[in-house]
Image (cartoon, grey):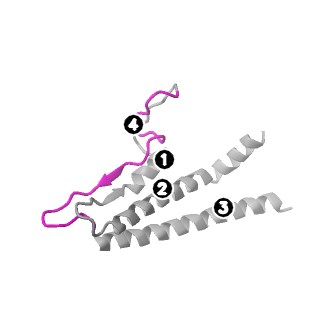
Amino acid sequence: MENKLSSFVFDQVKIPHFRKYLDLSSMRHRITSGNIANIATPGYKARSIDFQSEFAKMTKSGNKLAGLTTHQNHIALGNHQARPPKVEQAGISDGEINSVDIDKEMAGLAQNELRFTIAAKLLQLKFAGLRKAITSK
C-alpha cells in the first residue's frame, strides 16, 4: 500500500519528470564537455542531442506512436522511452580541423547549467511542499 500511495503522490507533482529532466541535462552536459575537451582533436565531430524531443520521448508527451512490448525480449519500436537518447554528430566543413565551435559549446554549456539549476531548485521546492503538507496540522 505504501508504494502505491507514494507513487501516486510523486506522480501527481511530476517528480519523475524532474528526475528525467535532470538526467537528460546531465547527459547533455557530458556531451558538451566532451566536445570542448576535443576542441583540438583533428577529425573530431561535435556531438549533440535534441533535448526537447528526447525529453518528450522520455515523458511520453510526444505526438509519435510508441510500440508496445509484450515480452521482455521484444525490441521497442517508435518513440519508446526505453530507447537511449539519439546523439547526433555534426559534419566537418572543408578546411576545418574538426566541427567543434567553442563559442557555441560554451553558450550551450552555460544554458544547460542554468536550466539544470532551475530544475533542481524547482524539485527542491516540490519536496519542501510535500514535506509541509505531511507535517502541517
Of 24 and 16, the residue lying toward us: 24
Q: Residues within 10 Å of mark 4 (few under 14, many from 20)?
A: few
Residue 73 in the image: x percent, y percent?
49, 27
2 or 1: tag closer to the N-terminus: 2
Q: CA distance from mark 2 to mark 4?
A: 19 Å
Considering every residue shown, the one lying at the far left of the view is 94
In the image, what residue occupies the spot 13% across and 63% down? 94
1 or 3: tag closer to the N-terminus: 1
Q: Residues within 10 Å of mark 3 (few under 14, many from 20)?
A: some
Identify residue for label 2.
24
Contact flag, marks 2 and 1 (Cβ < 8 Å): yes
On the rendered structure, is 78 left or right of 25?
A: left
**Secondary structure beneath label 3:** helix
Identify residue for label 3.
126
Stretch in magenta: 72-100
Q: Is residue 64 above or below residue 69?
A: below
Q: CA distance from mark 1 to mark 3?
A: 20 Å
2 or 4: tag closer to the N-terminus: 2
- Nearer the observer: mark 2 or 1; the answer is 2
Identify residue for label 1.
58
Q: Residues within 10 Å of mark 1 (few under 14, many from 20)?
A: many
Location of residue 35 by image quarter: bottom left
Q: Is residue 50 visible?
A: yes
Q: Is residue 74 above or below residue 131?
A: above
Asked if the magenta segment contains residue 31, the reply would be no
Question: For the stretch drawn in magenta, what is the main secondary structure?
Answer: loop
3 or 2: tag closer to the N-terminus: 2
